[in-house]
Image: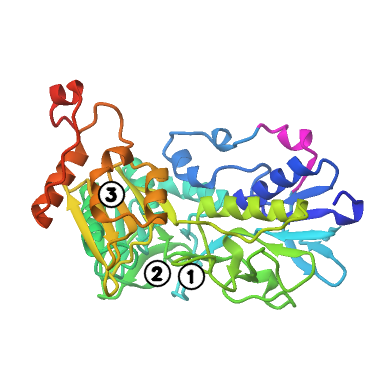
Amino acid sequence: MSEKSNHIVIIGNGISGVTCARNVRKKDREVPITLISAETEHFFSRTALMYIYMGHMKYEHTKPYADDFWEKNAIQLKSGWVSRVDFDNRLLHFQKGEELRYGTLILATGSKPNKFGWPGQDLEGVQGLYSYQDLLSMEKHTPSITRAVIVGGGLIGVEMAEMFSSRKIPVTFLVREKRFWDNILPDEEAELVGRHIREHGVDLRMETELTAILDDGAGKVKAVETSSGEQIPCEFVGLTAGVSPNIAIFTDSELATNRGILVDERFRTNLPDVYAIGDCAEFKTPPGPDRKNIEQVWYTGRMHGETLAHNLTSKNPVSYKPGIWFNSAKFFDIEYQTYGHVPARRRDGEWSFYWEDASGKIALRLLFSKADQLLGVNAFGWRMRHAFFDQAIRKGWPADKVVSRLDRANFNPEFYRDLQTEFIQAYNRETGKSLPLPKRSLIQRLIGTRA
């Protein structure tokens, strides 16, 4: 593994590529490693872009490692855009005419915001929010924005809406579905999120599609036209209708691609010594029940990098096994967690119990199989312990066992309101059960239902 001819070159310095480089270096101190990116000089936390714009952080605060980390760990950083890969000769060609030879190539090129051929989608002031350059572009346009329009209901769209709201910029949010994110969330959760977005002053338009982005005559956006025929004046359009693998430079090559770069359970492509990880990778077979062929989440990207690094440095390679699905996000002030699989529409034989508090900002759904085994969880405004639900889903706990032990799952701050008691009371009323309520401490009794 430590021969010079096996120079490892990684295209992309996001969480997948960096994790792979770090973990290879832990096992092999000699193998040359080069990490390529033209986005930023150093790795940063992409999920923190919104907080830079909102003034909560500075760019340097988002870098997990000191700038001298890379030199100390003998990881060469190269700035540049790769324009073509000559797989036969194991040679990378850069836009500026440079070349770099590799022994092992790892493709971690990430994602790009979706565009669907809308007229005017390439005008100035029209963009997504994925890269550091996108953040700089938003900052550049901000002083001239009197209204922003965001297209596509999803997590990045909510982030962008919160960013503009923090600068007191009016936002119109166009979503084609009937309820917000209702291709992912059941109706009750989708309604909760939609309400909360509106409560923050966002003009949320459901069942409304973008038909065109209008030019001001100088190549800049001046308005959008919707499926209802309305024109909404604006100086900025955020395209947040999802992302897709960033693989344009590979689509006409011998590398096998579909929506992403096709890989097996060990991230191997169809070419020798070429691997793909992160957002750009597409598994030929999903890596587990209710898992997708393309995983575009921060923690799965990290796991991709860890697994591939192990396989590159071990005589005992392993298949990628991500385990029980989980994810977390924020919808303005409401924290969201999900464990297992909770589809937007229940499948035959499944049943769920849903509880929402009187404020409409806290909710918990537990989904069970016909055989009364826990399948998935959605939590809003209620912090839960990952380990608890990971175990409960793996072991298929029945409803009564899950509900009666919710106090062990609770991860809310000390002195927070006693949500599990309220949940169990509601569960008992609806099911006719009489599960015991958790014992309350003296402090909890004194503060009562303080939120």
Q: Which residues are magenta?
A: 66-78
- Per the image, label 1 sits on a secondary structure element best described as loop
Q: CA distance from mark 3 to mark 1?
A: 43 Å
Residue ID at (57%, 54%): 301
Q: Are marks 2 and 1 in contact (CB under 8 Å)?
A: no
| Element type at mark 3 | helix
What residue lies at 37% left-to-right and 64% top-to-bottom? 152
Secondary structure state at the residue bearing disc 2: strand
The residue under label 1 is 115
Does 410 lie within the magenta span?
no
Please tell me whether residue 314 is drawn above or below residue 112 in the rendered image: above
Distance between mark 3 and mark 2 Cα atoms: 53 Å
Label at residue 402: 3
Is residue 101 visible in the rendered structure shown here?
A: yes
Mark nearest the camera among 3 and 2 is: 3
Does residue 263 appear to the left or right of 397 in the view shown?
right
